[in-house]
Amino acid sequence: MKKRFRKLSVLWLSFITLLSIAAPFVANEKPFFFDSSESQTGYTDYRQQRLDGKNNSGFFALIPYSSGVADAENSGPHSPFEKNYYHNSQGEKSVIPLRFHHWMGTDAIGSDVAAGVVFGLRHSLFIAVTAMVIALIIALVMGILSGYYSMYGIRISWSAILFFIFLFWAIWFYGCHIFSNEWRMFFSGNSSFYFLFKILFIIIIITSILLVLKRISDRFVIARKEINFSPDRWITATTQLFISVPQLILIITLSVFFQPSAFKIAVIFGLLMWTDLARIIRAEVLKMKQEGFIESCIASGLSTSQIIFRHILPNLKTVVRPLFLFGLASVILTESGLSFLGLGMGPDTVTLGSLLAQAKENMDAWWLMLFPGIFLFITILSLFNQGKQNNINGN
Amino acid sequence: MNTSLTKKLAIYLLSGVAVILASFFIAVQMPGDALDNLLLRQEKVSVSSYDYEIKKIEMAHRMGIDKPLFYFRMSSLAETGYEIYFATETKKDNYSKLLRKYGNSKEVYLFARNCQYTDEVLSGLNKKYNSSAIEKFSGYLQFIQKNSASTNMDSVWTMTENDHSLTEFRPLTNMLKHSWEKLAEQPHSYRAYIPAISFSADNRFNDWFFGGPLSHGLIHLDLGTSFFTGEKITSLLKNKIAWSLGFSLTAILLAFSIGIPLAAWIVSKKNKTLDKFIRIFAATGYAMPVYLAGVILLFLFSNPDILNIFPSSGVKPIGMNDNVSIAGKLWASVPYLILPLICYTFSLLAFAVSTAGELLQNQMSLPYIVTARAKGLDEKTIVYKHALKNVLPPLISLLANIFPAIIGGSVIIETLFSIPGMGNEIVRACLSRNFPLLSAIILISGFATIVMYALVDIAVYRLDPRIKPSAA
């Protein structure tokens, strides 16, 4: 029973991954192949040609609509069982011969729900995977740093601290603050990248000046004095700061300040999701240090990077995998919630959340609620199942 | 109080400061047309009037928007903070480009200001005469404004002087030329690359925190006014907080008072089918987001086609008499609150049952339970009297961990069922870019979370003094 569930969830996850990768080929209103020699009208009325049964030279996708494009003849929510109309080549309105033309019905403006679901899954998975990869990278760096250096910290001299503070300040001042206009122009795409060389030149000069100053200050005893810098304390304090504001409210606020696109939302999620991951990775690294094999690594003369990359990282795999899967599920849930509120990607982008929001507006249209709901539910359930299985295996 | 607890409370204090700073930086944001909106509403100035831009600058000065942001301002030697006086993005851009090239901030400001003044005069004239000469001259002016940092301006001056159709504008061109010559006389381009720290006690943070032209300050519990309606935010949010708090607390109480005894009952029964059932229930509660559950509930119970038992949105009947007593008001809004409460309690209940069950299961193999069994106690007494007491502290700290999620969940539920609470308000503030309101909500919810965490830490310490609150 359990095993069958597990197999089913793996199957479902690979199915939706394939579906979302191949989304433009699954749901598209343009034909893949079109013999233009047989028709004078070109691409615009490919659908008529297909339905009329003559000049059937195009090869169409399984769902012959793309998401968010209104079907003018069938405006308003249509059930999958209802008759659909189209304009035939004589310019008359006639009934579509296929029984299920809109596989999952249409929404309020007449765009296809099946196409919306496919593309919604694509957006959701893209955002979830990107966000979790970003979060995982940050969490690994933070967690390993704070776990590995938890006991003894990093010994660092005052001159080095001052050097790094001034260096970061210089990078901010000369790299971002002074050239803020150029950066803005650069990101909006109408500027040359000549100023990047300017920045590089300035920062190299500043760095060398700071290095010389550090050398000089190292002659004094006060500057050479070392203090114990514990990254653990700083990182735990940072995590504390991140959880002090409710995550959804933070995400909603940040999505107001940026023009939300899929990638930007993914970055926002990634920058907020790393705290839990980092805490658990830190605990795991601490546990590993107690097991003694790290101490034997140190004793046998391995360098810190060798210990971290060869010994700690592979051992973290079992802890990270379920957390990654749970994280995927929670990003998908939160992102759908965001677009359910109308604050996610712009109004033109169809997502699972926006389809559900439409279901709330049109209470008669059960198909608007059922299909996106089922897709969302099964996806989360199988991610949850996989995460739990991995968790059990890992422990 | 042990030291690790005080340390942790100190971290909470630090995060409180961070929340204050974050909400300040949100409060000072402005949508591009906010000043225009205010001007149109308060001063009754029409956009097309000749001194519109000047009125706008005066208004910004009166509201204290042109002050520096914080006590310390780190900038280059050339920057002075005059950017606020330039209305459009291109003018600001041109100003900062000029600053970079010439570095003498005062002269650059005068030149850019003269350009803007000329622009205003021209747009005033344009409405009256609308001749081709004016259009030609404004074309020149636009060229000057756009390219003054990159091209050689001498050719432009000779061109305007030789053009006979522009003789009427000689005073204006002379003014521009004169200020340009002053600007180009002594360029200090190095000044743009030298950092400088300036200090000013009169700044926007000071105004926001201790009181200024916009509000009485956070220290007097005044969070400013809403952009669009001009209402006081504190009085606006008072009712909303009451609704939100009452609603979520009811749901939490319901969920935990049902969930914990249920979990204890299931553990004491040791029934496999029950176990499986509860696992499925927990998985469903996890995978069913509140918005999906809410939409399904609305579809089933608030739908004229299926069952029309409960109203779909709002909290009270439309046009209800205000003279009714509080109990009467509450009674009237009961049918409105049933669906959202079911929806909310369901998601919390799944969480409560699964975690409480898991924690109890972990306890059941510990030595003290074995001792109790050896003593001959029945399973019911063991679970209810012994195990449940030991599970309480971790359950309470788990409650703190889900508290932010509870606020997040209530955002969606309140929006879905249109309950006039904080969650509904934050969505509306976001959609209408009402930044003072948004910052107030972030401040309040952030502080609520921090206080909750701190209270739970203290409570856990009181319940079980052996537990040392770890730093994380």
Image (cartoon, helix red, strand yellow):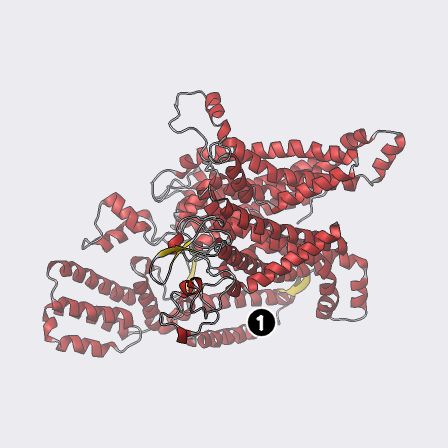
Observer-nearest of A15 and B141? A15
What x and y, as percent, mark residue A177?
Answer: 44, 65
What x and y, as percent, mark residue B467?
Answer: 73, 41
Q: Chain of mark 1?
A: A
Q: Is residue B393 visible?
A: yes
Judge left or right: residue B163 versus residue B278. Answer: left
Tell me which amino acid carries mark 1.
Lys
What x and y, as percent, mark residue B129?
Answer: 10, 61
**Position of the N terminus of chain B by quadrant:** top right
Observer-nearest of B73 and B307? B307
A190 up-or-down from B330: above or below: below
A160 up-or-down from A246: above or below: below
Question: Which residue is at 78% across, 71% downward?
Answer: A301
Observer-nearest of A87 and A138? A87
Question: Which residue is at 69% across, 41% downward?
Answer: B354
Circle 1 SS class: helix
Judge left or right: residue B143 versus residue B347. Answer: left
Label 1: few (<14), some (14–19) or many (≥20) C-alpha neighbours in 10 Å: some
The residue pinned by badge 1 equals: A214
Observer-nearest of A143 and B329? B329
Using the rendered view, name the quadrant where residue B9 is placed: top right
What x and y, as percent, mark residue B31?
Answer: 36, 52
Q: Is residue B1 visible?
A: no
The mark tally for this picture is 1
